[in-house]
Every structure is written in C-alpha cells, then in structure tokens.
Image (cartoon, helix red, strand yellow):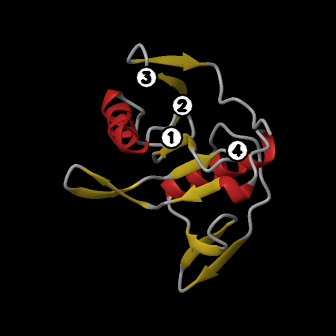
Amino acid sequence: MQKIHFPAYDFRYKSKENQRYVFDIIRKKFVVLTPEEWVRQHALWYLISDKHYPASLVNVEKKLVVGQMTKRYDIAVYDNSGRLSLLVECKRPDVPVTQYTFDQAARYNMVLEAPFLWLTNGLTHYYCHVDTVNKKYDFLKEIPEYIR
C-alpha cells in the first residue's frame, strides 16, 4: 500500500484467495484492504494509540440516513456520556480532499451533530470544530486528545 502521512502501526494482515485483509481493531474482524481501508485503519490507530481515545468509544462504518438516502460514515467517536464527539471522513489517497468532500462530511454531520470533524485521504488532513452558535467551522491544527 501507498505510504501515507501517519505513524507506522503494527497491523495484522492475512491473505485469502489472492485478496489481502487487515484486522480492524474496532470491528474485531479482518476486512479487505482497499486504499480507503488503509486510510481508515491508520486513522483508527492514530485516534487510539496517539490521541488516546478508548476503542470502546469508537464506531466504524455504521448506517446513516441523510435526507432519503442511506449512507455510511467512516468513523465516529463518542464521549463518555454517549454523545457523538468526532466524525471522521476517510478517502483513498488518490482522492483529493476538496470542498465536495467537506460538504459530504458536513451533510452527514447535519444529522449526527458532532462538534469536531476530521477529513483525511492519508496525505492531507483537515480538522475543524463545528461552531453551531455562529454557524461556522473553525479549522484546527490537529484533533484534540481524549480527555477523561
């Protein structure tokens, strides 16, 4: 897989019928290793290993209804009281993080109402705080560390 802008992590892999799989520490199963999954797995490990979010507060690829369409978000992180804290949208490294990508995450977040968003393709990362009072996005240098 392509080198991306994350620390190196000790992933578990397996191969089956000419297909490579990576172990997802949240879903507790091997999943097909696609370029988007490569980014998602790095983002998960970054949140858990580097930002110290408990794995028990992290959710991966769950259904979401936006308007009349069923979608799936990539990663959602909750706080200790069960409120959504962070929504992560992952793209393949060859898909640029653009206004379109941001708008997609913002549409998902209109339903989910997370106070923080992170958009990444593994090469470019955008972090922001959603200011619902002033109806704007404040861009951050990084995602905040987990606070107990």
Dot 3 and dot 1 residues touching (CB under 8 Å): no
Residue 118 in percent (x, y) is at: 53, 35
The amino acid sitting under disc 3 is Thr
Q: Residue at x 64, y 54 (%)?
A: 58
Q: Which mark, residue 121?
A: 1
* Three-letter code, disc 4: Leu
Quadrant of the image containing the C terminus: top right
Please name which of the two marks, 3 or 1, marks the residue nearer to the observer.
Answer: 3
Front tag of 1 and 4: 4
> Residue, x 70% and y 29% (percent of image)?
144
Percent coordinates x, y for residue 59 in the rendering: 58, 58
Q: Which label number is shown at residue 47?
A: 4
Which of labels 3 and 4 is toward the front? 3
Q: Which residue is mark 2?
A: 124
* Secondary-structure class at tag 1: loop
Spatial separation of the CA atoms under disc 1 and disc 4: 15 Å
Which of the 4 image quadrants contains residue 124? Answer: top right
Residue 1 appears in view: no
| Residue 99: numbered disc | none
Sequence-earlier tag: 1 or 4: 4
Q: Position of residue 52 (x, y in %)?
A: 79, 43
